Image (cartoon, grey):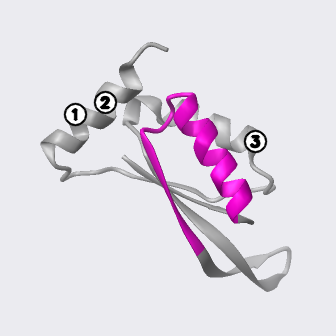
Amino acid sequence: MLVVLTTTSVGKGESLAERLVENKLAACVQIVPQITSVYFWKGKVQKENEQLLLIKTTEDKYSELEKFIAESHSYEVPEIVAIRSENVSGPYQAWVEEYLLLKS
């Protein structure tokens, strides 16, 4: 499963990414710096520079991951978009599942 999320800064994105991996909610998080988001919020169109996080996880971990993000994110309504992965290479999927099942 791929979860897409935005943050306000690289520092916040890196901090969140590290906590997601350390807590075994994600096997990998990629941070794409400097995207521009245009969206409607509180009655007007907004434009912000953000960082895009691409979070690799499993469906089994999604609820816990979503709760963790909602509780720790600086946004009032963080963008948390989960995309089911229909085609993932077998070895990569096995690695994701193996890491997320490892006991600390």
Magenta residue check for 50: no
Q: Secondary structure at mark 1?
A: helix
Above-or-below relation of 41 to 5:
below
- Residue 61, x across and y down, in percent: 46, 31
> Where is mark 3, residue-wise?
72
Residue 35 versus residue 67 in the image, above or below:
below
Q: Which residue is mark 2?
A: 97
Q: Residues within 10 Å of mark 3 (few under 14, many from 20)?
A: few
* Residue 57: image location, x then y, percent: 41, 40
The amino acid type, in three-letter code, at marker 3 is Ser
Q: Residues within 10 Å of mark 1 (few under 14, many from 20)?
A: few
x 40%, y 27%: residue: 100
Which residue is drawn at the image coordinates 66% and 43% (left, top)?
69
- Residue at 75% x, 41% y is 72
Report the amino acid beneath label 2: Glu
Label at residue 94: 1
Earlier residue among tags 3 and 1 = 3
Q: Is residue 3 visible?
A: yes
Instruction: Tell me: 23 left or right of 44.
Output: left
Q: Find the magenta span and give its range.
A: 10-33
Q: CA distance from mark 3 to mark 2?
A: 24 Å
Q: Amino acid at mark 1?
A: Ala
Q: Are marks 3 and 2 in contact (CB under 8 Å)?
A: no
In the picture, residue 10 is in which quadrant? Answer: bottom right
Q: Is the C-beta separation of discs 1 and 2 under 8 Å?
A: yes
